[in-house]
Image: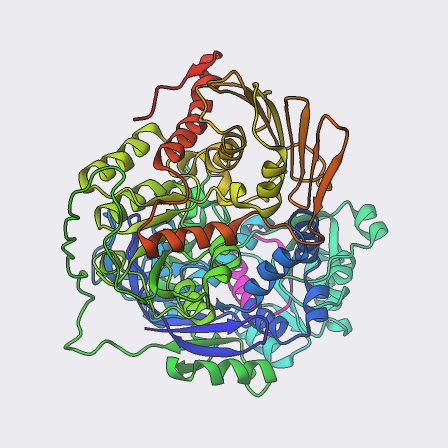
Amino acid sequence: MKQVVQNYKSGELALLDVPVPDCKPGGVLVRTAYSLISTGTELMKVSEAGMSMLGKARSRPDQVAKVVQSVATNGVPATYRKVMGKLDSYTPLGYSLCGVVEQVGAGIDDVKAGDLVACAGNEHALHAELNWVPKNLYAPVPDGLAPRHAAFGTVGSIALQGVRQGESRLGEVALVIGLGLIGQLVVQLLTASGVRVVGADPDPERCVLAERLGAAACGDPASPAVESAVASLTDGHGADQVYLAAGGGSNQPVELAARLCRDRGRVVDIGKCRLDLPWNAYYEKELDVRFSRSYGPGRYDPEYEIEGRDYPIGYVRWTERRNLACFLDLVARGRVDVEPLITRTAAFADAVETYRGLKEGDLKAVAVLFRYPEPAAEEGPLADPPAVTVPSVPGGGKGSSAPVRAAKTPVRLAFVGAGNYATSMLLPHLAGRDGVELSTVVTTTALSAANAQRKFGFREATTDLDAVLGDPSVDAVFVVTRHSSHAELTRRALLAGKAVFVEKPLALTEDELTGVLAAVEESGNDRLQVGFNRRFAPLLQEARKRFGARTGPASLRYLVNAGRLDHGSWYLQQGTEGSRFAGEGGHFVDTASWLLGADPVSVYALAPSGNEDLQVALGYPDGSTATIAYVTTGAAGFPKETLDLVADGKVLQLDDFVRTSVYDGRKRWMSSRLPKARDKGQSAELAAFVRAVRTGGPMPVPLRSLVATTTATLAVRAALTGGAPVTLAEVR
């Protein structure tokens, strides 16, 4: 299928061939009929992409701050790869469309194939021929409403949420500053609510359009006409509400709002304009400044938008989805007229040229629609993908070796997932490696697969996992998805006879771990590696060698300064993705166990109330102990990982993978230092995995150890709940 994309690094716009997205549970697959260009938000993004790197940095100081912090935590090379990987990727455009339901995912019962729906979301209602849309981001289109008009649903919801934030009442007077697409819709919504409206915009054609659509008067904000109209309608008191629907770097809209708003009036910011509030003006009138967050309550909440958990109507009357349905109803009943806003309807095939015309000013428009071709009659609705029969793997039981490979043939790898970690920490070490062929990348979103194929040279990109698991040419599968899917995807890949590299964690529950082990037992395939990469770090390897063998028990202290996560991070979705320690703690348990040369036999844990900090104590068969302090409340500038190992009169120290030191009984320091970079072992780990797959030799880490580490990590929750040490049963 085709999708409009942009490379944020180069500014390139393209109509790209990408795989059809998967129809996941909790949503529907929609074939687009019309999609709407947001001539404000989208053109701002397009313009930013055309800036120099310095210009991009100036326009996004929030992202620059994140880069600086990443350098302090991960070093320059890793941060550079991460940042450039994000910049040099195709990003989607679009967030408002109307289309026909092609497939219905599990759990959806309010629409069926063939229904017309309006869709929202900058990750789900894209300028693409097909989109997967979760339940709370679509709404059925009322009977009789034209699809081209229903495509305005999302921008209409943005305008509607802004009006709700203004709490307008019958008979009041409102000033709308900025008469672009959102401003024109705000004018109509206020007029339909019985509010008299004055508009302000430097474009005389937009002023004429707003008056035609119900505004009492409009004019250039720099002229006396706007102030005169507000004074006339309010007997000189000023507007009850001012809606900032303008963009750009000028502070004029904010200053005009203060001058023309009445005492204790409301100023609502809907657009993205400069907000240097003149303190005296806003203080003296005690103005109420409010922000309108996109489509309404639910926006940026993954439990609402992705998982489909609605807010009870008794507590949240107008959610994203209810705003969307309300706006569609207003248009269907003729209370809002979007037809006069449509400057052009362009064929989807001309998308790139249309964007260029808008960017360069050749096409001046309030609203532009893309019209999509109808599917050929013989094509019909999308059929379900054919079932793939996975061949059974011959027996061999635990410890079995891989099938014999043909000499000199490359190891063919498939990736399930192509997110930030996969593209910045794994694939750069595999792309171009001798003896490795990146066969197929599988993702649930079409564009991420296409990006990975373009950047790393995958032979194919798809959203069909079954086809990959059934492909006999694929030797190994990398599972690099969200934590909640690791165990199930690992289980399926093992049953399909593939060697598996799964990023940590292997499992989030004991039942999931049992399922993975059952797949090993059933298939006789134990070719499994979990991404516990620290034990492969060159500095730690060297320090362990210098420390030498132990004769007595050891004490190990591991401080992990994990830090706080950004709001909205999927790591915070503990209901589905597990706790942070369940997802990440295996790294530190595995490192401790590797250094101590044994698997833990007991786990005890303590946690202070009110945050995610943990103190985990591990006991080992020879009496050695390891304590892991996993903290989120430490200073951001402090190293993330520091470790001390003490035994037999010797001390091993690790300083965040840039320095290791060993102090022995002869009072001699032996130090290693790796300047600037932090090598946490990913490259060496991947080399060991590929070598094991190629030769059929043992996997880099015994299955027993992988399971023991996972069991110990999961036992932390039980230790916290029970308030007592947990003894770990022997792993067989």
Q: Magenta stretch: residue 514 in it?
A: no
Q: Nearer the viewer, residue 235 or 543?
A: 543
- Residue toward you, 225 or 712: 712
Q: Residue at x 64, y 68 (%)?
A: 178
Q: Is 465 drawn above or below residue 377 in the view shown?
A: above
Q: Residue at x 21, y 60 (%)?
A: 472
Toward the bottom, the furthest residue is: 362
Q: Specify start and end residues of the magenta stretch as a single range.
A: 168-191
Farthest-out residue, front? 666
Residue 201, image x and y in percent? 66, 72
At 15% from the left edge and 61% from the top edge, which residue is drawn? 386
User: Where is the C terminus found, in terms of image quarters?
Assistant: top left
| Identity of the residue furthest to the top in this view | 724
Residue 728 is situated, as x and y percent measured from the top left of the image, at 39, 19
Q: Quadrant of residue 364?
A: bottom right
For image coordinates 29% across by 42% down, the residue present is 488
Taking the image as drawn, is residue 325 in sight? no
On the picture, is 114 further left or further right than 65? left
* Quadrant assignment for the N terminus: bottom left
